[in-house]
C-alpha cells in the first residue's frame, strides 16, 4: 500500500542495533499531517488527498489560503502537499496521518531540498580535475577548454561551468526505518537525508524496495 507523510529534519545521532552495531540515523519529526482537501475521481479525475503539516498563525497566511483552510475547518498549516494514496477514497477532511503508518524495518524514499552552497567553481560543483600546479603553469582551477574556435564557434551545451550549487530537490532511495516513537511523532531513519536541520522532507514507501 502506498504510504507517505511530511516531516521536519531534526538532525543526526547514533543508535545501537540488537547485534551491538552502531547505526548512524537521521531523526525526523514526522507528522501528524492533517487532511485539508480530498480529490475524487468524479470531481477531479483522480483520487488523492492534500495534507497540511505544522500549524501557523493566521497573520502569516495569505488571504486565498485563509479561505482554503476555513473551508476545510482544520486550522492554518505551514506546508501543503498532495499524495495519491491507495486509501485516499476512505479518508475524509480533518483526518490525521500519523507516524504509525510506517513500521520499523520499512524501506522508504526520503525527498528534501539540499543545502545551498552558493556560487561554486567547477572543481567543487562537478568534480573536475585541476591544472598542473608546477612547471610554470598558471592555470589551476579554471573550467578548461571552451571548445574549438572556428567550428562550431560556440560553447557546446552541457559544458561543465561554475555556478550556483545546491538548493535542489534530492531523493535518497531505499533507506530503512530503524526506530519509531509514535507518542513523540519521531522517526529514526538509517543514514543521511537531504537538507538542513529544520528542513521539510517527504517520506514515502520505497519504489525499489529490496
Image (cartoon, rainbow, N blue to C red):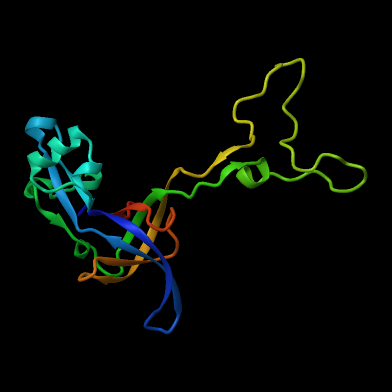
Tell me where residue 185 sits by quadrant: bottom left
Quadrant of the rendering where the N terminus is positioned: bottom left
Q: Is residue 155 above or below residue 115?
A: above
Residue 61: which quarter of the image?
A: top left
Q: Is residue 188 above or below residue 17?
A: above
Front residue of this view, candidates 188 and 108: 188
Q: Looking at this view, name the residue that lies furthest to the right.
A: 135
Is 98 or 109 nearer to us in this picture? 98
Residue 97, horizontal then vertical, whole percent: 17, 56
Q: Residue at x 24, y 67 (%)?
A: 103
Q: Position of residue 27 (x, y in %)?
A: 36, 66
Where residue 3 sits in the image (x, y, percent)?
A: 22, 54
Residue lying at 19% horizontally and 33% vertically, measured from the top left: 63
| Left or right: where 147 falls relative to 11 | right
Residue 94 visible (yes or no): yes
Determine whether, in the image, residue 81 is placed left or right of residue 156.
left
* Number of numbered callouts drawn: 0
Residue furthest out toward the front: 59
Q: In screen coordinates, is 142 left or right of 206?
A: right
Say above or below: 198 vs 148.
below
Q: Quadrant of the C terminus?
A: bottom left
Instruction: Tell which of 11 and 124 is nearer to you.
Output: 11
Asked whether residue 209 is in view, the answer is no
- Identify which residue is drawn at 68% across, 19% down: 154
Quadrant of residue 123 in the image? top right
Note whether 175 is above or below 53 in the view shown: below
Amino acid at each position: 500500500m502506498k504510504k507517505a507523510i511530511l516531516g521536519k529534519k531534526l538532525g543526526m545521532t547514533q543508535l545501537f542495533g540488537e547485534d551491538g552495531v552502531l547505526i548512524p540515523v537521521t531523526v525526523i519529526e514526522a507528522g501528524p499531517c492533517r487532511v485539508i482537501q480530498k480529490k475524487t475521481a468524479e470531481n477531479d479525475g483522480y483520487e488523492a488527498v492534500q495534507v497540511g503539516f505544522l500549524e501557523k498563525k493566521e497573520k502569516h497566511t495569505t488571504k486565498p489560503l485563509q479561505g482554503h483552510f476555513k473551508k476545510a475547518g482544520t486550522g492554518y498549516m505551514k506546508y501543503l502537499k498532495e499524495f495519491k494514496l491507495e486509501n485516499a477514497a476512505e479518508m475524509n477532511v480533518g483526518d490525521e496521518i500519523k507516524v504509525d503508518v510506517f513500521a520499523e524495518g520499512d524501506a522508504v524514499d526520503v525527498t528534501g531540498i539540499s543545502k545551498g552552497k552558493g556560487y561554486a567553481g567547477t572543481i567543487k560543483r562537478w568534480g573536475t580535475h585541476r591544472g598542473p600546479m608546477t612547471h610554470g603553469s598558471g592555470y589551476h582551477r579554471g573550467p578548461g577548454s571552451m571548445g574549438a574556435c572556428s567550428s562550431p564557434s560556440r560553447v557546446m551545451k552541457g559544458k561543465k561551468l561554475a555556478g550556483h550549487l545546491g538548493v535542489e530537490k534530492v531523493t535518497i532511495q531505499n533507506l530503512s526505518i530503524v526506530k519509531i516513537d509514535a507518542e513523540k511523532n519521531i522517526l529514526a531513519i538509517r543514514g543521511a537525508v537531504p537538507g538542513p536541520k529544520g528542513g521539510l522532507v517527504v517520506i514515502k514507501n520505497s519504489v525499489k524496495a529490496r
